[in-house]
Image (tube, rainbow, N blue to C red):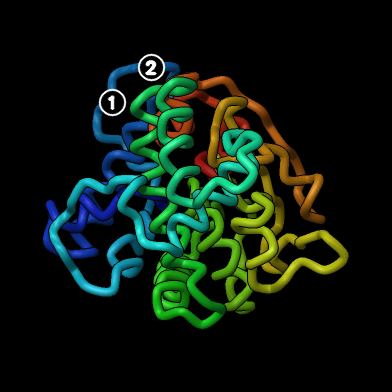
């Protein structure tokens, strides 16, 4: 089964329900994974993914229509996430005495110059959703998202969970919060789990001695990150988490560095998931 990443609220708007959004995404994940497993052969309806756990609608206090976000108009919690993220990327520069608003303007320009409009749009989804999830240890968005993922794992009893982007954080916490859950293989794609000041120090359970731990119900944890993925900082998780079996670096697309389409389609997951598809 899969766990989606950031920026997927639009699926809820289009489908009108979480169930519809999840099914639309499952069909896409099947096609993406087929591209990687088959080497690009035409897709003829193969099913690989039992369900994609959907939680994007739970990160919002109300259910508004999808709207374009703007880095310069984000709420203060989202701006603080952005400021901490900027430090990880080296985008803050040396602007002593600069206001937060001034830094946001500079960073928006820096992102456009370095990685183009796609990176700026990514940031406009990433920061508010991370801020909503980590609003507090018992924030409604956090608990409900975590429980939604746990419910899908419990219902499907998958041997493999593939979690992308922020979904890797939600899945990680769900597996810890529900010790009755177990999976043979946990694959994280483009994961921000080790991002200092933004995610790592706010995880539940809290890292101890500067290190997190693999959830106890996970048999093997494989982490895959593109070398240019600005959400996966650092890309390697072994340096921060005990129990990671392998860190794997890929090069999927410098300008489209974070999409699950490219991660599943590049073939990096093949060796890990193929044994389970043959059972």
Q: Give the answer, above or below, for where 102 lies relative to 91.
A: below
Q: Quadrant of residue 238?
A: top right
- Position of residue 179 in the picture relative to residue 148 (left or right): right
Q: Give the answer, above or below, for where 174 lies relative to 261.
A: below
Q: Position of residue 236 (x, y in %)?
A: 72, 39
- Position of residue 222 in the picture relative to residue 267 (left or right): right
Name the disc covering residue 242, or none: none
- Report the residue marked by disc 2: 40
Q: Quadrant of residue 48?
A: top left
Marks 1 and 2, how far apart at CA? 8 Å
Q: Using the image as rendered, state which of residue 255 and residue 191 is in the foreground.
A: 255
Q: Quadrant of residue 246?
A: top right
Q: Are marks 1 and 2 in contact (CB under 8 Å)?
A: no
Q: Which residue is at 51% across, 58% downward?
A: 80
Q: Using the image as rendered, state which of residue 46 and residue 264 is in the foreground.
A: 264
Around disc 2, counting alpha carbons within 10 Å, would you say few (fewer than 14), some (14 to 19), or many (20 or more)? some
- Position of residue 75 in the picture relative to residue 191 (left or right): left
Q: Position of residue 6 (x, y in %)?
A: 39, 50
- Report the residue marked by disc 1: 43
Q: Position of residue 106 (x, y in %)?
A: 46, 35
Query: Can I make out residue 154 in this image?
Result: no
Q: Which residue is at 58% across, 68% downward?
A: 173
Query: Can I make out residue 174 in this image?
Result: yes
Q: Using the image as rendered, state which of residue 253 and residue 74 is in the foreground.
A: 74
Q: Using the image as rendered, state which of residue 66 and residue 161 is in the foreground.
A: 66
Q: Which residue is at 34% across, 47% downward?
A: 72
Around disc 1, counting alpha carbons within 10 Å, would you say few (fewer than 14), some (14 to 19), or many (20 or more)? few
Q: Secondary structure at mark 1?
A: loop
Q: Give the answer, above or below, for where 22 lies relative to 141.
A: above
Q: Secondary structure at mark 2?
A: loop
Quarter of the figure with the C terminus: top right
């Amino acid at each position: 089964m899969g766990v989606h990443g950031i920026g997927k609220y639009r699926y809820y708007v289009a489908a009108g329900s979480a169930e519809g959004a999840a099914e639309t995404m499952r069909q896409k994940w099947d096609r993406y994974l087929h591209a990687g497993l088959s080497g690009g052969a035409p897709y003829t309806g193969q099913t690989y993914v039992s369900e994609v756990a959907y939680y994007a609608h739970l990160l919002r206090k109300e259910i508004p229509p999808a709207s374009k976000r703007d880095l310069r108009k984000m709420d203060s919690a989202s701006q603080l996430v952005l400021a901490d993220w900027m430090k990880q990327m080296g985008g803050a520069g040396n602007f002593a005495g600069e206001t937060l608003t001034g830094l946001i303007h500079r960073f928006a320009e820096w992102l456009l110059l370095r990685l183009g409009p796609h990176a700026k749009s990514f940031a406009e989804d990433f920061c508010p959703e991370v801020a909503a999830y980590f609003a507090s240890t018992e924030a409604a968005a956090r608990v409900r998202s975590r429980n939604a993922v746990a419910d899908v794992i419990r219902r499907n009893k998958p041997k493999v969970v593939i979690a992308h982007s922020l979904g890797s954080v939600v899945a990680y916490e769900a597996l810890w919060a529900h010790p009755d859950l177990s999976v043979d293989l946990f694959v994280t794609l483009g994961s921000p789990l080790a991002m200092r000041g933004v995610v790592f120090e706010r995880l539940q359970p809290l890292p101890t001695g500067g290190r997190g731990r693999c959830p106890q119900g996970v048999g093997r944890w494989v982490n895959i990150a593109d070398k240019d993925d600005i959400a996966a900082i650092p890309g390697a998780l072994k340096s921060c988490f005990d129990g990671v079996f392998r860190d794997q670096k890929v090069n999927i697309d410098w300008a489209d560095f974070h999409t699950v389409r490219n991660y599943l389609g590049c073939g990096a997951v093949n060796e890990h998931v193929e044994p389970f598809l043959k059972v």
